[in-house]
Image (tube, grey):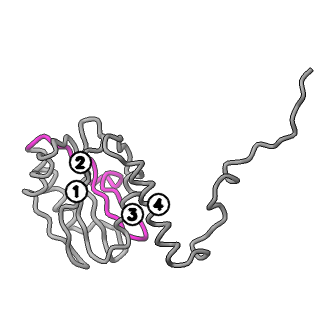
């Protein structure tokens, strides 16, 4: 004889301590703490050796970490031949409306960690993520320079606090 239980299994939402909570429910210090926690979770998901296989996965991390900056930052994500994370390096830091990017330094960084592939990331402080002509030009120059040493450029993401754009998804690579 079997006894059936009337116990209802809790849903995933019932186990979520943040369910139903909105940003306006948090004090400024709590918001900062939550952003720090989110960055920690994303960093844990994107540890060295983890495969980074989609623009969406990188977009969520870099939009959160670079989106609110008041100056432009240009970084390179270096990957091995299986697209596993080797390193993320902030290559150049600029001002409110631009950052100078030097192909020689990008090539040196890729060779230093023996990268087989790379993804570029930079932020637009204006909030507008559409690639400028300068963004397209430097991406082409970097792609050509890295191709000379056997490093593939997989993507270039532009992020802001409002959105993010992938060159690969736009067909620009």
Q: What's the mark number on residue 78?
A: 2
User: What residue is rendered at 81% in x and 43% in y?
Assistant: 8
- Asked if the residue at tag 2 contacts the one at tag 3, i.e. Cβ–Cβ closer than 8 Å, the answer is no
Please give the name of the residue rendered at 27% of the width and 56% of the height, measured from the top-left corner: 156
Q: Residues within 10 Å of mark 2 (few under 14, many from 20)?
A: many
Answer left or right for 54 relative to 79: right
Q: CA distance from mark 4 to mark 3?
A: 12 Å
Neighbourhood count class around disc 1 (C-alpha, 10 Å): few under 14, some 14–19, many 20 upward: some
Q: Earlier in the sequence, mark 3 or mark 2?
A: 3
Q: Is residue 108 above or below residue 5?
A: below
Task: Name the N-terminal-most of marks 4 and 3.
Answer: 4
The reply to whether the C-beta atoms of the residues labelled 4 and 3 are less than 8 Å apart is: no
**Mark 4 Cα shell of 10 Å, populated few (<14), some (14-19), many (≥20):** some
Q: Which residue does the numbered mark 1 point to in the structure image?
A: 89
Q: Is residue 153 left or right of residue 23?
A: left
Residue indicated by mark 4: 38
- Percent across and percent down for residue 25 are 61, 75
Front residue of 160 and 65: 65
């Amino acid at each position: 004889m079997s006894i059936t239980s009337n116990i209802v299994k809790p849903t995933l939402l019932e186990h979520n301590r943040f369910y139903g909570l909105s940003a306006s429910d948090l004090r400024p210090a709590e918001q900062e703490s939550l952003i720090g926690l989110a960055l920690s979770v994303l960093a844990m998901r994107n540890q060295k050796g983890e495969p980074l296989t989609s623009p969406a996965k990188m977009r969520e991390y870099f939009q959160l970490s670079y989106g609110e900056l008041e100056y432009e930052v240009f970084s390179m994500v270096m990957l091995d031949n299986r697209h596993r994370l080797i390193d993320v390096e902030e290559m150049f830091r600029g001002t409110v409306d631009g950052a100078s990017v030097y192909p020689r330094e990008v090539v040196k960084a890729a060779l230093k960690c023996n990268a087989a592939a790379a993804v570029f990331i930079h932020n637009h402080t204006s909030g507008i993520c559409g690639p400028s002509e300068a963004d397209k030009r430097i991406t082409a120059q970097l792609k050509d320079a890295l191709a000379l040493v056997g490093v593939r450029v997989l993507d270039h993401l532009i992020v802001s606090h409002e959105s993010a754009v992938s060159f690969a998804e736009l067909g620009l690579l």
